[in-house]
Amino acid sequence: MTAVREVLRRPIGHFAERSVAGLATIAGAGAAFGLLLMLVRFRWSPLYTADRAVAEWFNDLVASHGPVVTVLQAATDLGGRPVLIWLVTIAVVGLLIRRQPRLAVYLIVTGVGGLILDPSLKTLVGRLRPIVDVPVASAPGNSFPSGHALGSFVAYGALLLVFLPALAPRWRRPAIALVAALVVLIGLTRIALGVHFVSDVLAGWLLGAAWLGVTAYAFRLWRRERGRPAPPLAEGLEPEAGHDIAPAPAEEHVLEHPRSAVAELLVGWVLVFGVLYGFGMYVSYHAGGTFLATLDTEVPRWFAQRHTPALTELSWWWSKFGDTHAILLVSLVFCPLVLAVWRRWRPVLFVALAMFGELSLFLTSAHAVGRPRPPVENLDGPMPTSSFPSGHIAATICLYTAIAVLVMARTDRWWRWLTVVLAVAMPLGVAASRIYRGMHHPTDFMGAILLSALWIGLLYWVVRPNADVYAGNRPSIEGEDVHTLDDELARAARVD
């Protein structure tokens, strides 16, 4: 009986020891933040002097180097609200799909708390942002604490705690180090860009550590109340969920023969470029007097004669559906959902290669052909690339065709036909808007169709994105067995 009591007492003792250490860490981070808050609030002179000196030093260091500023701005965006909200939202949806509602709730509570703390404390303190000799960036609102430092610490830290069990043990320490380095990098970019003082960034990190520690500790108490062991944080919040949240736990090889696939894609890319180059040179410089030349002359002119304010506004919006930001946004939403439902990297690879190949083929062929824009008013003004082929149209065709190819093979629900409708309607709408705005000839549209058809066909033959379906793979969501996806997500969201 004594031995049994000792066995039961050890886990409880270990949990208590870890709890005391964790609470001490949380309290220390909170106390350090409180001290820093008071020093800033009461304008402690040595702190202000040090903050200004560092801000001026960084400004002198980076202001004269445009490429460095560009890199810093790209890095700092990784801690911005749009990126963090997208990451957390996609993770929450994926966890609900994988039937992990507790982890989804943890991410929501932790993320919302971080969003509330940042603006409220900025308003309370009311500290102005640094004033430097050569401003290289700007940011709205007050300065203390740094929202990027706070948000990145909370969001990336919470995602790490949730998905750490999905990593093999040998990769967990490198993952922790990578996340820590990313958070530090984002904080340093805020100082280097001159939009925050050092104390702002330190305060963001301290507050982020305190809030992340509070929510993690609360989650551990939640597990203990349900009779589950409280593992060390180095193992993640729920180690037993590792298999369920792993992106593709049963996928041994993304491609059966990766080396030959790479060779086939490289050879195919060169052949597709050759076809595009030949067609582009012909319609651009050697098709005079043909039907294609008449088409390229009359159609843009016909659209230019029918410009109205309403149609111009509509064409601007529809044209945006084919620009880089819209295409990237749709891809970054679709790919994680496919990965969550089907637990396979191959469909994601198919979409990624479709977009990368389209972009590289478009840029290369546009530079090689060098076709001028139509001789009508170009509503979008001067563009950095030439007219042939249309990058907007090609990107739209490749993306929505890839989505339709994947969805049509993976469900028999009626809504799968909506992807086919989008694969037809979206490119037609973007093409009409681009020609209306005087940015492309009709044969540029033909070139985009040629590029997309050849490249998507090549990818389908080499990657075989639906091979797992034909082998019997079933989705994490059995959408065919329920009336709507909402019903399935509702069941997954019920806490056990």
Image: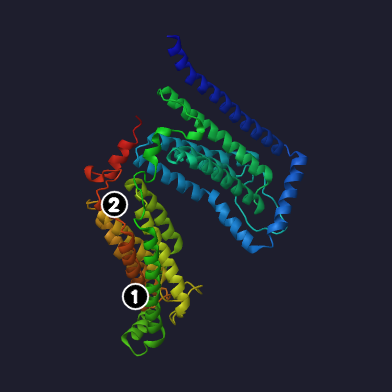
Image quarter of the C terminus: top left
The tag earlier along the polypeptide, 1 or 2, is: 1
Q: Which amino acid does label 2 sit on?
A: Asp
Image quarter (top left, top right, bottom left or bottom right) of the N terminus: top left
Residue assigned mark 1: 446
- The secondary element bearing badge 1 is classed as helix
Tag 2's secondary structure? helix
| Rendered view: 88 above or below 298 | above
Residue 203: percent from the left, percent from the top?
64, 39
Query: Which residue in the rendered view is the most extreme toward the top?
Result: 1
Residue drawn at (68%, 36%) of the image: 36
Residue at (50, 47) in percent of width and height = 84
The answer, for residue 435, to whether it is visible in the render is yes
Cα gap from disc 1 to disc 2, whole angstroms: 33 Å
- Mark 1, residues whose alpha carbon is within 10 Å: few (<14), some, or many (≥20)? some
Q: What is the three-letter code of the residue carrying label 1?
A: Met
Residue assigned mark 2: 468
Please tell me which residue lies in front, 154 or 168: 168
Q: Report the mark closest to the observer, 1 or 2.
A: 2
Asked if residue 320 shows in the view, the reply is no
Determine crowd level at label 2: few under 14, some 14-19, many 20+ residues with C-alpha closer than 10 A.
some
Tag of residue 373: none
Task: Residue 325 in the image: state x and y as whole percent.
Answer: 45, 60
Image: 223 above or below 423: above
